Amino acid sequence: MTAATIQDVLARYVENITTVEVHYADENGPKSGDADIRCTVEVRFEGRKPVAVTHHAADLPIALEAAAEKMARMLEHQLGRIRDEANGSRSE
């Protein structure tokens, strides 16, 4: 997965997003191990607190794709809440 693919995953939310940051870390350094690549995706909305998700995987493409998909699900939830607030209703 590349930056272009992240853009594809997050494209439907682009009007609400001001910044996207992606951070990677190899948590085991030179030692090998399962799920040692950590990918964190942080998204900022204008006038809102940033939201972030993290995924651990054995390699970078898998970690990035899974983190991007988690972010898409989170944004769907967050934007649903924003729409509910704008419409004067809140789901508890």
Image (tube, rainbow, N blue to C red):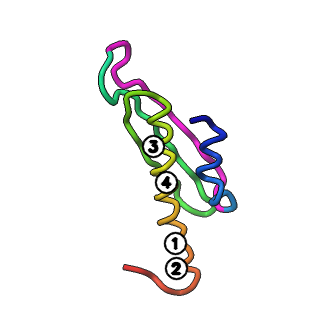
Question: Closer to us: mark 1 or mark 3?
Answer: 3
The residues colored magenta run: 16-31
Q: Which residue is mark 3?
A: 66
Q: Position of residue 73 (x, y in %)?
A: 47, 58
Contact? badges 3 and 2 (CB < 8 Å): no
Crowdedness near tag 4: few (<14), some (14–19) or many (≥20) residues, C-alpha within 10 Å: some
Q: What's the CA distance linking mark 4 and mark 3?
A: 16 Å
Q: What's the CA distance linking mark 2 and mark 1?
A: 6 Å
Contact? badges 4 and 1 (CB < 8 Å): no
At x 52% / y 55%, what residue is drawn?
Answer: 72
Q: Position of residue 44 (x, y in %)?
A: 58, 53
Disc 3 residue type (three-letter): Ala
Give the mark nearer the N terminus: 2 vs 4.
Answer: 4
For label 1, the SS is helix
Q: What's the CA distance linking mark 4 and mark 1?
A: 14 Å
Q: Which residue is mark 4?
A: 51
Q: Which residue is mark 2?
A: 84
